């Protein structure tokens, strides 16, 4: 059988957050102590915002999907102010009065999980692009917070959730794995997945 080269368009990515394609391999218990885990994941302990941007061609170049990931440490002092700055930058990419203005936002988390015996620890990434039923809107259903949010004007940023009861979330969140008893030990990050679809000439202009 002859191997044919892929005809899919490459994904353009920049920024400092991890690519969703690499999350799955990390979602297993690995470290024997929480301290060891944290020492190997110092990048997740940065206060933030830590931002990455991905562009993907959609529908044979009929449009471009812009996804921006904005990550904060869970104990960040002022997530609201950080979001306002980042969305100010995003809105500068949007032509005035262009069709489809605005962004869809999904909120998720990165968390430390452990087995019931407390002998294995791992980072569980809420951002997930798997094709299984456990993923929705680029986030694991287990760790997705509420529904998606629409930000069509800078003032709408104030409606995004920025305060969370992590103790309650740890108690009520159920992680769905086969043959696993993983539980959440600690929330490390709040992650905002920001999406916008652009079409035709507008899409090309926004990428310049």
Image: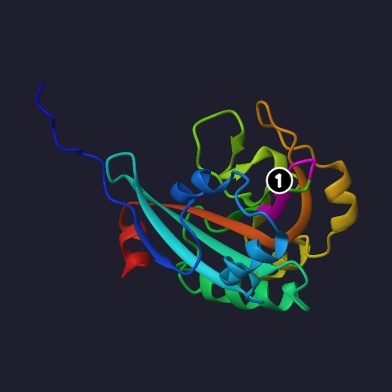
| The quadrant where residue 116 appears | top right
Which SS class for mark 1?
helix
Q: Is residue 80 above or below residue 102?
A: below
- Outermost residue, left direction? 2
Residue 113 lies in magenta, yes or no? yes
Q: Which residue is located at x 76 percent, y 78 percent?
A: 78
The magenta-colored residue range is 107-117
- Per the image, the residue denoted by label 1 is 143
Judged by its main secondary structure, the magenta piece is strand
| The quadrant where residue 88 appears | bottom right
Q: Is residue 149 above or below residue 116?
A: below
Residue 35 lies in magenta, yes or no? no
Residue 65: x %, y % from top left: 42, 51
The scheme the figure's colours follow is rainbow
Residue 153: tell me if it is visible: no
| Along the viewing direction, whichever of 139 and 86 lies nearer the viewer | 139
| Along the viewing direction, whichever of 67 and 173 lies nearer the viewer | 173
Query: Quarter of the image containing the C terminus?
Result: bottom left
Q: Which residue is located at x 11 percent, y 21 percent?
A: 1
| Count of numbered badges drawn on the protein | 1
Q: Which residue is located at x 60 percent, y 38 percent?
A: 136
Residue 125: x %, y % from top left: 61, 51
Residue 58: tell me if it is visible: yes
Residue 180: x %, y % from top left: 70, 32
Dot 1 surroundings within 10 Å: few (below 14), some, or many (20 or more)? many
Q: Could you tell whether 158 is left or right of 49 in the image?
A: right
Residue 173: x %, y % from top left: 81, 42
């Amino acid at each position: 059988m002859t191997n044919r080269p892929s005809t899919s368009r490459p994904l353009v990515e920049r920024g400092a957050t991890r690519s969703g394609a690499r999350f799955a391999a990390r979602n297993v218990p690995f470290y024997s102590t929480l301290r060891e885990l944290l020492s190997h994941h110092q990048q997740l302990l940065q206060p933030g915002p830590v931002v990455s941007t991905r562009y993907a061609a959609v529908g044979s170049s009929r449009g471009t999907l812009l996804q921006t990931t904005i990550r904060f440490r869970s104990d960040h002092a002022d997530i609201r102010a950080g979001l306002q700055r980042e969305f100010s930058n995003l809105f500068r990419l949007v032509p005035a009065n262009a069709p489809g203005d605005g962004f869809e936002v999904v909120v998720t988390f990165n968390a430390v999980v452990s087995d019931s015996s407390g002998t294995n620890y791992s980072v569980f990434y809420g951002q997930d692009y798997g094709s299984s039923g456990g993923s929705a809107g680029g986030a694991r259903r287990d760790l997705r917070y509420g529904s998606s949010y629409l930000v069509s004007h800078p003032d709408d940023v104030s409606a995004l959730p920025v305060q969370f009861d992590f103790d309650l979330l740890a108690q009520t969140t159920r992680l769905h794995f086969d043959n696993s008893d993983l539980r959440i030990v600690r929330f490390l990050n709040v992650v905002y997945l920001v999406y916008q679809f652009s079409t035709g000439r507008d899409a090309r202009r926004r990428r310049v």
